[in-house]
Amino acid sequence: LCLMCWSARVLEAAEPKDLAKLKPFPEQGAYEKDGKKYECGLYPGGKNEMPEAHRKAGEKITATVVPLNASGKPDANGLIVLGAAGHSNPREYFGAYKTFIAEEGKKGTLNPKVILMSACQGGKMCQDWAAQCRTGTPGGIPKEMQVLFLLTSYHNASRDATEKKQPEALKLSFEERTKAMKNDLVVILQAFVKGYPQLKLAYVSCDTWRGNSGLEPEVWEEAFAFKDLIADQLKGAPELAYEGPNRKAPWLAWGGYIWENNPAKERFAKDGVHPSEAGKAFAYGRWHEVLTKDSTSRGWLLPPQAAGR
C-alpha cells in the first residue's frame, strides 16, 4: 500500500470525524487519521491532473476504440459499447446517463454509435463484485464492451440500516479498509478484462456523500483506494498492466468525482440515500463533463468530426 509514502506531502489536515471540515477529495490537500497524514488529490503528488505519460498512453488506446460487431470485429455498422458496474446509486446515475447518451446521439451532439449498458445491481457493493469475480465472469454487458465505468463503495448500507450495526468493512482500520478495497478493485478489473477481451479503458470513482446513513467519513475515505489503485498502475504494477502480452487490466483514470459535503436535499429521494432526478443529473453530469473534455475519451464519445476522426 502506497498511502504511507504520501504522508510527507501535507498541505492541510482534517479531523476524521469532523465532517464540516471535509472537502471534496480533489480540494482537501491532506487528511489526518489515526495520528497520520495522507495526501489527497486524485493523482500522486497531490495533483488532480493526469500525469502526461499516462494521458499519452490513454490517447493511444482511445484511437483504437472503434465500432465493433457482436463478434468483436471492427464494423462500420457496429457499436461502441460502454459498460457500467456498481450498486443501486450508480444504477440510477448510469441509467439516466444511458438515456441522455441515446438522445444526444440522435441529435448528433454525441457519437451515435455509442451505447451505455449497465450491469449495476442494488446492494452489490465492491466486496460483492469481487466475490463474484473470484468465481466467474461478471455478466450483464455485451461482450464487445470497450469502455467500463466503475463507481462503487465498500459499505453495505441496507445491512447497516436494518441490523443497526457496523458492516464488517467498516470495522477495519482506515488503512486496512483502503488496502482491502483496492485489492478488490484489482480483482474486479482483472475479471472484466478476462471476460471482456475488447475492454481497453476504465473510468473509476467513489460514491457521493452518505452522511444521511451515518457512513461518513468512511465513504469519503474510499477515494484513497481509487487513488492508490491508479497510482499502482502508474508505477507499473504487473497486476494492473494494461498493454502487452501480460495485460491484466484496462487503462485506468478517474471518472467524475461526485462527493460533496452535505449536498442539497433535493438531490436525494425521500429515503435520503438514493438520488432524485436532480441527483441523477448532477452525478452523470459530472462524468459527462470529464469525458467530453478529456483527450482520452473525446475520441469515442463525441461525433467523429468533433473528435477529429
Image (cartoon, rainbow, N blue to C red):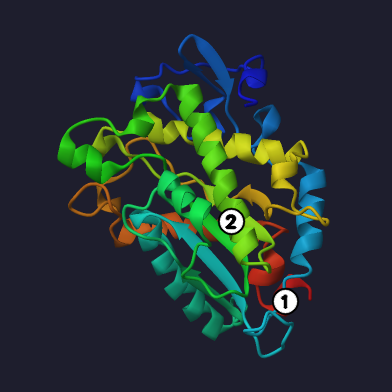
Location of residue 275 (image quadrant): bottom left
Contact between labelled residues 1 and 2, with CB atoms less than 8 Å apart: no
**Badge 2 element:** helix
Looking at this rendering, what residue extends furthest in the front direction? 135
Residue 171's spot in the image, x, y percent?
35, 25
Q: Is residue 305 above or below residue 189?
A: below
List the residue tagged with mark 1.
66
Q: CA distance from mark 2 to mark 1?
A: 22 Å
Residue 251's spot in the image, x, y percent?
70, 53
Looking at the rendered image, the quarter that the C terminus falls into is bottom right
Left or right of 122? Residue 129 is right
User: What residue type is disc 1 on?
Assistant: Val
Q: Nearer the viewer, mark 2 or mark 1?
A: 2
Q: Nearer the viewer, residue 50 or 224?
A: 224
Q: Is residue 277 in view from this perspective?
A: yes
Q: Is residue 237 above or below residue 267?
A: above
List the residue tagged with mark 2.
191
Q: Earlier in the sequence, mark 2 or mark 1?
A: 1
Q: Is residue 25 in view from this perspective?
A: no
Mark 1: few/some/many CA within 10 Å (<14, 14-19, 20+): many
**Badge 1 element:** loop
Q: Nearer the viewer, residue 230 or 55?
A: 230
Residue 192's spot in the image, x, y percent?
59, 59
User: What residue type is disc 2 on?
Assistant: Ala
Mark 2: few/some/many CA within 10 Å (<14, 14-19, 20+): many
Residue 282's spot in the image, x, y percent?
41, 55
Residue at point 76% right, 36% down? Answer: 235
Left or right of 188? Residue 236 is right
Location of residue 93 (image quadrant): bottom left
Residue at point 38% right, 33% down? Answer: 169
Left or right of 22? Residue 205 is right
